[in-house]
Amino acid sequence: MFRRTLTALAFVATPALAQQSDLTLAIQLEPPHLDPTSAAAGAIDSVLYSNVFEGLTRFAADGSVEPALAESWEISEDGTTYTFTLREGVRFHDGSAFDAEDVKFSLDRARAEDSVNAQKALFEGISEVSVVDPATVEITLAQPDGSFLFNLAWGDAVIVAPETIEGIKQSPVGTGPFAFSEWVQGDRVELTRYADYWGPAPALEAATFKFISDPTAAFAAMMAQDIDAFAGFPAPENIAQFEVDPRFQVLMGSTEGETILAMNNGQEPFDDPAVREAVAHAIDRQAIIDGAMFGQGTPIGTHFAPHHPDYVDLTDLSPHDPEVARQMLADAGYGEGFSTTLKLPPPSYARRGGEIIAAQLREVGIETEITNLEWAQWLEEVFRGKDYGLTIVSHTEPMDIGIYARPDYYFQYDNPDFQALMTELTGTTDAGDRSDLLAEAQRMIAEDHVNGYLFQLAFPTVADARLKGLWQNQPTQANPLAGVSWAE
Amino acid sequence: MIRRLAPGAALSLVFVVAALLSYLWTPYAVDGMAIADRLKAPSGAHLLGTDHFGRDILSMLMVGARTSLAVALVAVGIGMGLGVPLGLAAAARHGGWLDEVIMRGNDLVFAFPSLVIAILITAIAGPSALNAIIAIGIFNVPVFARLTRGAALALWAREFIMAARVAGKGRVRISVEHILPNVTNLLIVQGTIQFSLGILAEAGLSYVGLGAQPPVPSWGRMLADAQTMVALAPHVALMPGLAIVFSVLGLNLLGDGLRDALDPKLREVRA
């Protein structure tokens, strides 16, 4: 009798206890280490950005820049001095206080001569960082920079503490709403809620980031509900099934990922703009989006995110027309066609897209030899070694049109006009002027057909139907969990 | 005898004919993509349906059979071409240093897991059908060498070999004229079995992306490409899977049938 009562009680109690306060979120790639300030790997930010680490400013879910560790700031008349007022009472996860010295340390470390920061260009304009008092930092720029606050929001510009910098790659210590607790390599990273967080306390008590790279395993884990959500679901063909299943919700977001068919501008035959234009005409963007991504993606005509207000639709510059492409190749002296290499990294947009592009290029007489590479090999051979003819990759950094001003970048586009334009853009703070310059820049690389511009990568998140507050879009690679909660 | 050979031979023949026919004709071009027609179930227009790029699966299987059979055939060729002479030499010099060297070399190759080494070879030399052939072929060598040596040793003790030696024939001549013809039936049987293992190995290597590279169709890669679509269109994974199953089954049945037909001992028992 007594036992029966207990059982009955347990049943009554269950619904109240069922209120879940932990989350298991899967992403595809595992970070190589956990220091966002010393590697280009986006997976580091996917786990840590706005969860463990914060910068002076940060990206909001809609891509705008909002205050984070800096409560407010003042910009001098000439636009070269930024005075930041820091948030008070902020503590690192190890209990030490956050103050102006930490800001100076972090920024000086990032812009130092021997810094290994992957985005050193973000800090190039800084000429001095000085501590006014523990809650005020003054940053002096060599010249006005209209995107300085934006630059500070990047994951590469987060604030770290000098006391804990030694072990940052294995046990990161930041100021964010979640503290790092464990990293089981090859499997997961665990975070726990940080009780002394300066902002509103997150609803979740604990969060686990799980790394599942295989699309089949991702599908199985999601279907079996071993994971609560998968950010950036890697098998676009399975999305439709989740959409019709009442257990799940699908958030179809956009990313900053311009997916391009990169051409080696420093090497024959792609040093000839006419050949590049021919390639652009040979490509059928919609067929690639349908065939490789099952319809998920927005066609682009230049290296710029379509959801950005300054985006110019330039897809008309290179409509799909094999006839025109063949003619252009003939005029450029490649009437017989030519053969080149097509090196593909692992994601399905590249592997499948590559097969489709190979077929489309074959139609106009360009033979491609496909080589499938792992990421490490791709970085070595293509990105650093520049040993390739064609490759497909998605550039997921926000506002990264500036890479076209770097002649040593892997596609080796060297145009002094464009470089001058970028220098001018950096020195421009007026919003209207910036828009004009950005439009001109987009048009310049599109008319030069530097690369084949394919589509903006979609970002499908599959999640338990009861989850709220996940980022739908990816203004930067991140999965901030402070605002995530389970529905009642 | 024919009755036991028939099913295996027929099944194997289907794949050989399909592979040969694909040189002359396939229902559709294998590189003909039609995204709009993707993942169509089997129908009159596409007998086995279409894959995720709208390519005709039957056509791809026919050309894929070519890849599989060619890889397996050359791999068995390498194995026999090197393994049989080695085995004959070892038997002819039984107990001598040459025998030792050859057989310990065999043991060495046997000590490594073949598929893992094949992956290593293709990882170093780059993925391609040719490297897959070499990798699979190397591991066929000790199989044939051992088989040949074992059978040859038994023959060396027989009276007709002694007669040949008394008649003054050298070891090389005896090996070629008397030993080899008498181990041929064994080699044919083992050859068919290695052939089916070669098909499996090729499918395995191209499944992990180390065999024939796209756009050349191969069964293993078709299977790999289809695996995330199993829930969506099962036939895309089922068709190459069945092709692998039936070709291997056919060759194994053929091997069994051949053994029954060629082995004199079994023949006597049954008679």
Image (spheres, coloured by chain):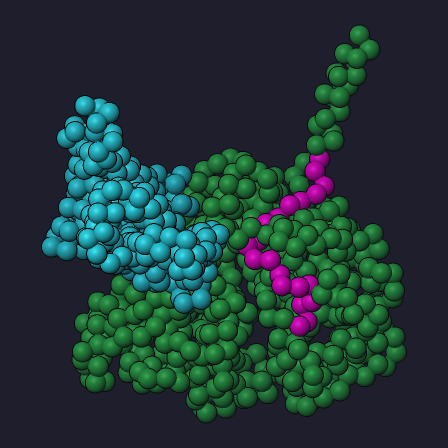
Quadrant (top left/top right/bottom left/bottom right) for the C terminus of chain A: top right
Q: Is residue A216 left or right of residue A84?
A: left
Q: Where does residue B108 sit, x and y in percent of width and height?
A: 47, 56
A292 to the left or right of A192: left
Residue in the picture at 78% in, 70% down? A165
SS majority, magenta: loop
Q: Which chain is cyan?
A: B
Quarter of image, res A284: bottom left
Nearer to the camera, A189 or B80 = B80
Of residues A191 and B236, the one nearer the viewer is B236
User: Chain A appears what colour?
Assistant: green
How many numbered marks does the figure carry? 0
Which of the image's four quarters has the N terminus of chain A?
A: top right
| Residue visible at 80% across and 53% down in the picture | A194
- In the image, residue A374 sits, relative to residue A219, either above or below, namely below
Give the percent coordinates (x, y) of residue A372.
Answer: 40, 63
Residue A273 at x, y percent in the picture: 32, 84
Q: In this image, A42 relative to A259: left or right? A: right
Q: Which residues are magenta?
A: A19-38
> Which of these two is toward me, A108 or B229?
B229
Asked which quadrant contains residue A18, the reply is top right
Q: Please tell me whether residue A36 belongs to the stretch shown in magenta.
A: yes
Specify whether residue B263 is painted magenta: no
Q: Residue at x 68, y 60 (%)?
A: A48
Residue at the spot 25% in from the left edge and 77% down from the top edge = A338
Q: Is residue A234 above or below residue A453?
A: above
Residue furthest front in the image: B166
